[in-house]
Image: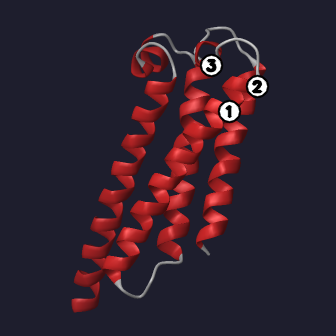
Amino acid sequence: MSDIVNGLGRATAYGALGLLLLVLGIVLVDLLTPGKLGRQIWEERNRNAALVLSSALLGIGGIVFTSIWTTYEDFGKGLVSTAVFGLLGLVMMAVAFLVVDLITPGRLGSTLVDPEPHPAVWVTASCNLAVSAVVSASIA
């Protein structure tokens, strides 16, 4: 029974940390794109914005999953590792976004929230997932 209680405590802590990192991912995408992201997606039904945000959330989720899956035996060390790698993933996604913005014409943030479908959205989403894969691979 104590194993179950211990497991629930760990799951709660990792779950809370994962949710915090996902919220930070939402804030990051909102900062990198013009306008209010929530309004863009839920009120204006902007598919471009939804795809960019979805890819960032999947990427962070993948990093958190990998970090938990390969966690240290020491719970505290595993929790810190998950936080550090999650934050690293967010920073790397932001840097990748800024690099793509620098090497492409126009303002990437504005393109990504344009109501008309744009191929740059797929490039940005792929970049988010690629960064996540690289960070995840470095954990193992």
Vertical relation: 88 (above or below) 53: below
- Closer to the camera: disc 2 or disc 3? 2
Q: Quadrant of the C terminus?
A: bottom right
Query: In the depicted view, which residue is nearer to us: 124 or 42?
Result: 124
From this viewpoint, is residue 1 visible?
A: no
Dot 3 surroundings within 10 Å: few (below 14), some, or many (20 or more)?
A: many
Q: Secondary structure at mark 1?
A: helix
Vertical relation: 65 (above or below) 126: below
Residue 14: which disc?
Answer: none
Q: Quadrant of the N terminus?
A: bottom left
Three-letter amino acid code at the position of disc 2: Ile
Q: Secondary structure at mark 2?
A: helix
Location of residue 23 in the rendering, given as x and y in whole percent from the top left corner: 37, 41
Three-letter amino acid code at the position of disc 3: Leu
Q: Mark 1 vs mark 3: which is more N-terminal?
A: 1
> Residue placed at 68% from the left, 8% from the top?
116
Residue 112: which disc?
Answer: 3
- CB contact under 8 Å: marks 1 and 3: no
Location of residue 98 in the rendering, given as x and y in whole percent from the top left corner: 62, 30
Instruction: Give the Cα separation between the discs numbered 2 and 3.
Output: 15 Å
From this viewpoint, is residue 45 visible?
A: yes
Q: Which residue is mark 1?
A: 99
Q: Which residue is mark 2?
A: 103
Location of residue 10 in the rendering, given as x and y in whole percent from the top left corner: 30, 75
How many numbered discs? 3
- Closer to the camera: disc 1 or disc 3? 1
> Residue placed at 40% from the left, 16% from the top?
36
- CB contact under 8 Å: marks 2 and 1: yes
- CB contact under 8 Å: marks 2 and 3: no
Three-letter amino acid code at the position of disc 1: Val
Location of residue 28 in the rendering, given as x and y in whole percent from the top left corner: 45, 34
Instruction: Give the Cα separation between the discs numbered 1 and 3.
Output: 15 Å
